[in-house]
Amino acid sequence: MQIAWDFFQNQILGMRWLNALIGNLLAAVGLDISSRLGGSVQFFIYDVIKIVALLCVLIFGISCIQSYFPPERSKKILGRFRGIGANCVAALLGTVTPFCSCSSIPLFIGFTSAGLPLGVTFSFLISSPMVDLGSLVLLMSIFGGKVAVVYVLTGLVIAVIGGTLIEKLHMENYVEEFIRAASAVDIEADDLTRRDRLKYAWEQMAATFKKVFPYILIGVGIGAIIHNWIPESWIVTALGGNNPFSVILATVVGVPMYADIFGTLPVAEALYAKGAQLGAILAFMMGVTTLSLPSMIMLRKAVKTRLLELFIGICTMGIIAVGYLFNALQFIF
């Protein structure tokens, strides 16, 4: 069983065979892959192909699932639950939306306008970019199954606690008036045929690919530089075990950036290979995907400053706590 799992993780998800194939092809054309330049070229080509392949397969599959949960149906599902149960369901629904933080905000606005409890909609807003199903598979390809599962579970915990806290503080008056006054149109989604769902999934995959591909190239480029040009001692000093503030540093650095998990993965992979602590790497990924500056600017249009500050504070503290938890448990993984 362990042999089969290792093969699945390394050769199917991690595509180690592809890395070896690209190395052989580059060597055949005279490029020394043991050099910095050759290693960077190999890393870049391998990671771009691997991430794009995983992205297309994952987004297609997730979009098929998502076709069963249009906004109208999601709203009705969430409306059946109360209290922390509603927060849990909202966080779980967020996992089937393969969106970055900016793409999740319009759905958050729609749910809030429809009259769903504010804490429930915030649980969805936190979980959607942080712990989608794609992140589970992608993290497995780099860090293994245990890390991926714990990452997703802790992300869901942040979403549930964050939404519940916002609900308990009764922050409804800090939502912009135009959203509170909006009346959502309750339209029943038409039943889709299998062909319609496949078409929808294909369109979602193509649209997502076009949107995130530039960030994949940027992320892989940064990862190639880290992997082959930045001395390992620098990474260990900043994000290694001897720096007690590595998680906080990684979170602060990640927040102003804009990308989704597909763009952060190659950076995380390179940092991990250079000796950065696991908790710092995952805190960086959570910070980038959940609290990017563009998404916070968009969210400010929907909520007032005090609620925005509370949201950022809850997410930041949750991310830092998860980072230190992973550092403390790193020997298990």
Image (cartoon, rainbow, N blue to C red):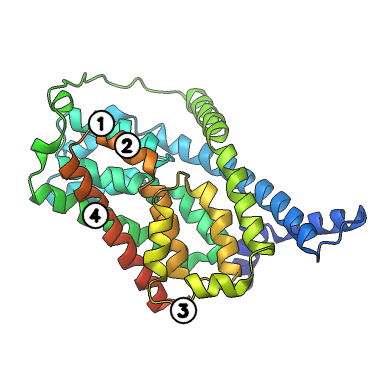
If you read the primary sequence from the N terminus, does the residue marked by circle 2 or circle 4 appear first? 2
Q: CA distance from mark 3 to mark 1?
A: 40 Å
Q: Residue at x 19, y 41 (%)?
A: 305
Disc with the residue nearer the chain's start (2 vs 3): 3
Residue 1, image x, y percentages = 58, 72
Q: Which residue is mark 3?
A: 241
Task: Locate residue 128: give its quadrant.
Answer: top left
| Residue 315 in the image, given as x and y percentages of width and height | 28, 54
Q: Residues within 10 Å of mark 4 (few under 14, many from 20)?
A: few
Element at label 1: loop
Distance of label 3 from label 4 (alpha carbons): 25 Å
Reading the image, the residue beneath label 1 is 301
Residue tagged 2: 297
- Cα distance between the residues tagged 1 and 2: 7 Å
Q: Quick one: SS at disc 3?
A: loop
Between 254 and 56, the residue placed more toward the observer is 254
Label annotation for residue 62:
none
Mark before the other along the chain sequence, 1 or 4: 1
